[in-house]
Amino acid sequence: MLRFVSYNIHSGRDLFWRRRLLEMGETLQALQPDFIGLQEIHQNSRYGFQATYLAEALQYQLAFSPSLAIADGYYGNALLSRLPLTAIASVPLPARQEKRSLLQASSTYESQSIQIWVTHCSLHQASRERQLTLLRRLAEEYNDAPLLLMGDFNMTGASFAPWLIDCARACGLERKPTLPSIRRRIDYMFASPHWRIANYETIPVRWSDHFPILTDLELAHSTPRE
């Protein structure tokens, strides 16, 4: 079984803009995930090389997908992994204003190649709809490989059916908010039918403006849907 965590870390700050990167790392360590998808990550000297810090603190491999060039560095998504990562790619997503990206990576589990993707969609509705269209097309193209897509989608009711299954909904927990300030679920984990969804949780810690979310997956060893 593999454990995946997705966490929008809000630039390493809580809702009151206090630094919380240490507490975030401690929470992630306690959860013992195999893969961690992170959004709103700064990789620069002003905020600290946050992805590098967390990867080194947890002793995980790091993949980083820059969405924006900022002062002396980048801002974007990251994937931390206990297992070796290969075929790492950063895919730009269509955006009218602030640039967004999709991080794609492969790993091997039970002698099978698996795909782990991390993204952060736009607040702007028109841009977000274009991003979702591209993400759905990419998910459909990867129908032959076990895939887990996770991230902050900045919307309620996100769906990738029939290609991917909403892990929270599969466990009857789709009403659990991930953005506590407005009690909405805008962070998601979507699994391809190659996986059996054993567990889903929202972790109620307030180190960021988002809650981290967690899912445990097993390979189903069944034929994927056409």
Image: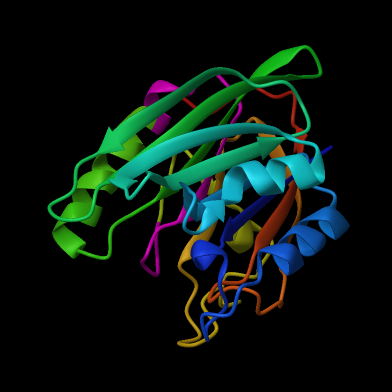
Tell me which corner region of the image, top left, top right, bottom left or bottom right, holds residue 66. top left
What's drawn in magenta, residue-wise? 139-158
Residue at 39 percent across and 29 percent down: it is: 90
Residue at 36 percent across and 67 percent down: it is: 155
Q: How many marks?
A: 0
Establish if 225 lies above or below 121: above
**Residue 51 placement (x, y as % from top left):** 59, 45
Establish if 40 lies above or below 142: below
Tell me if residue 151 is in the magenta stretch. Answer: yes
**Residue 44 in the figure: left or right of residue 127:** right
Residue at 58 percent across and 51 percent down: it is: 50
Quarter in which the N terminus is drawn: top right
**Residue 216 placement (x, y as % from top left):** 77, 48
**Residue 168 in the figure: left or right of residue 226:** right
Is residue 29 or residue 189 the one in the foreground?
Answer: 29
**Residue 115 in the figure: left or right of residue 54:** left
**Residue 124 placement (x, y as % from top left):** 20, 64
